[in-house]
Amino acid sequence: MVQFTRRHFAALAGLAVLAGCSSNDPLATPSTTATAAGSGASSGAKPTLVVGSQQYYSNEIIAELYAQVLEKDGYTITRQYQIGQREIYLPEIKNGKIDVFPEYGGNLLQALDKSSKAHTKDEIITALGTALGSGLRVLNAADASDQDSYTVTKALADQHGLVTIADLTKVGGTIKVGANSEFATRPYGPSGLKTVYGVTAEVTPIEDSGGPLTVKALVDGKVQAADIYTADPAIAKNNLVVLQDPKALILPQNVVPVVSQKVDEAAAAAINKVSAALTAADLQKLNARSVDEKLKSAEIATDWLKQKGLV
């Protein structure tokens, strides 16, 4: 679902709408980055772990799920949320500045190995084990995913009989796609769209990672399609249509934790419990709480973890 991108905002308005999420300084040192109050963190033998997130409310919620289960198990957690897009945070992970980060399988693999032929969830996870290189590994992938998509309004879908991405050719001309500017160079962007489905498209830059500005541009007809992550509650609320992708232009984007060598087996086991419980429906509900109730990621995460018996 990326989300991206998933996922850095140039439009601060999108962040204002999604006020349920943290805006900690991503460059903050551990001494200035807070841990959740009452989390039971310990400064004993267990290492301090830095948990990061993209600049995207859904990704921050997942990061907070990891952070809280680790704190329950006695790890001291430093939060570095809202870091930005993969181009910004991936070097930080590789340099050992972040220990735990929620990622999206297919997009991460394409960023690391553009020649990979992996297409299924399991193939992608296996390929990531090699593509990440030394010092990093992926843990178990969740059932939950947050796919990038080509999404249109129901009115446009009904008008032209749009069901699959290939059907965008029925609209005619060059399709304007609302998305973050980096979408233009993604493998599933205009170049891939032309190669795989024969659709000519151009990106209209909207720097809110498929957020409210992107949705508004689509609903208002400023663009004909948009990259909106599939776990976004705005799709159902606005009666939008996610076009089917039978040729897998966009690889499966299952949520997968990327971790450093500081993450020992006990910490990995705690994170894997989150992945085992996190379904696609769960992620949609978590995202809806952020948008509708304007709750902080810590509140949303605590409620879900308690419901699942993980804290």
Image (tube, helix red, strand yellow):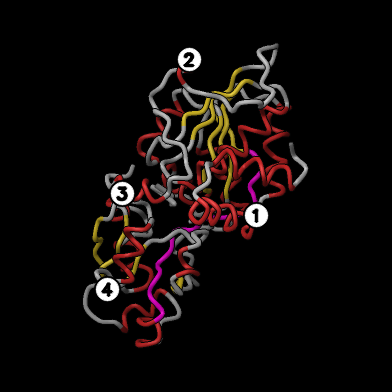
Q: Secondary structure at mark 1?
A: loop
Q: CA distance from mark 1 to mark 2?
A: 35 Å
Q: Mark 1 highlights which residue?
A: 143
- The residue drawn where x is 38% and y is 59% is 188
Q: Mark 4 highlights which residue?
A: 221
Q: CA distance from mark 4 to mark 3?
A: 20 Å
Closer mark to the observer between disc 4 and disc 3 = 3
Circle on res. 31:
2
Highlighted magenta segment, given as a residue range: 139-154
Crowd tier of the residue under label 1, counting other residues whose Cα lies within 10 Å: few below 14, some 14–19, many 20 or above: some
Closer mark to the observer between disc 1 and disc 4 = 4
Q: Mark 3 highlights which residue?
A: 13
Indicate left or right for 76 with 235 as reference. right
Residue 155: within the magenta? Answer: no
Crowd tier of the residue under label 2, counting other residues whose Cα lies within 10 Å: few below 14, some 14–19, many 20 or above: few
- The residue drawn where x is 40% and y is 30% is 91
Q: Secondary structure at mark 3?
A: helix
Indicate the position of residue 107 as horizontal and vertical percent values: 46, 50
Q: Amino acid at mark 1?
A: Asp
Q: CA distance from mark 1 to mark 3?
A: 31 Å
Q: Amino acid at mark 4?
A: Gly
* Main SS, magenta residues: loop
Q: Secondary structure at mark 2?
A: helix
Closer mark to the observer between disc 1 and disc 3 = 3
Q: CA distance from mark 1 to mark 4?
A: 33 Å
282 or 174: nearer the viewer: 282
Q: Are marks 1 and 3 in contact (CB under 8 Å)?
A: no
Quarter where residue 72 is shown: top right
Ranked by sequence position, the earlier of labels 1 and 4 is 1
Q: CA distance from mark 4 to mark 2?
A: 47 Å
